[in-house]
Image (tube, rainbow, N blue to C red):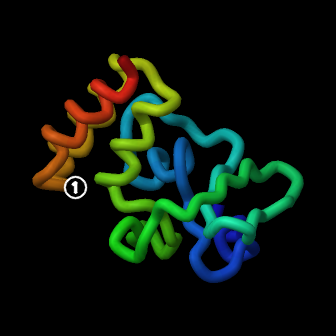
Amino acid sequence: MAAAVLAGGGGTAASHRSACVLWGLRGFGRGQVEVLSARWRRLDALGIRAHESKAYGPGDFDERDGIATLTVERTLLLIGSFAGANLVEAALDDAIRQDLTTEAKEIGRAACRERV
């Protein structure tokens, strides 16, 4: 995962399921590495699922285990775009239990609403 983030250059971070793994959120195992980078800086590498966006700013990024990743708050919001409500709720419970964020309850509710 670290190699994929480094290969993407500045502004690239672990995202989606990979960010869930880094944050230790339940229900997400190591699988295909997913990274997010700025629009037009897409990483094309075998075995890496690359996402690009202009909608993220410096406040959306953090570091976990020495790897650039999305903040736990942004990760929780993103989970709602690809996972069911039960998985979102489990991840939210993990974030609260681990004291990763004080905003987790509201973020989880917003993520669940996005799925509807």
Position of residue 65 relative to residue 48, above or below, is below
The residue shown at (50%, 71%) is 68
Residue 29: percent from the left, percent from the top? 55, 36
The residue shown at (14%, 50%) is 103
Q: Mark 1 points at which residue?
A: 100
Position of residue 97 relative to residue 44, above or below, is above
Q: In this view, does 105 lie to the left or right of 25?
A: left
The residue shown at (62%, 82%) is 10
For mark 1, give the secondary structure.
Answer: loop
Residue 97: percent from the left, percent from the top? 16, 42
Q: Is residue 19 left or right of residue 5?
A: left
Q: In which quarter of the view is residue 60 placed?
A: bottom left
Can you name the residue that lies furthest to the bottom here?
10
Along the line of sight, which residue is nearer the eye, 37 or 39?
39
Residue 28: percent from the left, percent from the top? 49, 35
The residue shown at (88%, 53%) is 46
Along the line of sight, which residue is nearer the eye, 44 or 115?
115
**Viewport quadrant of the N terminus:** bottom right
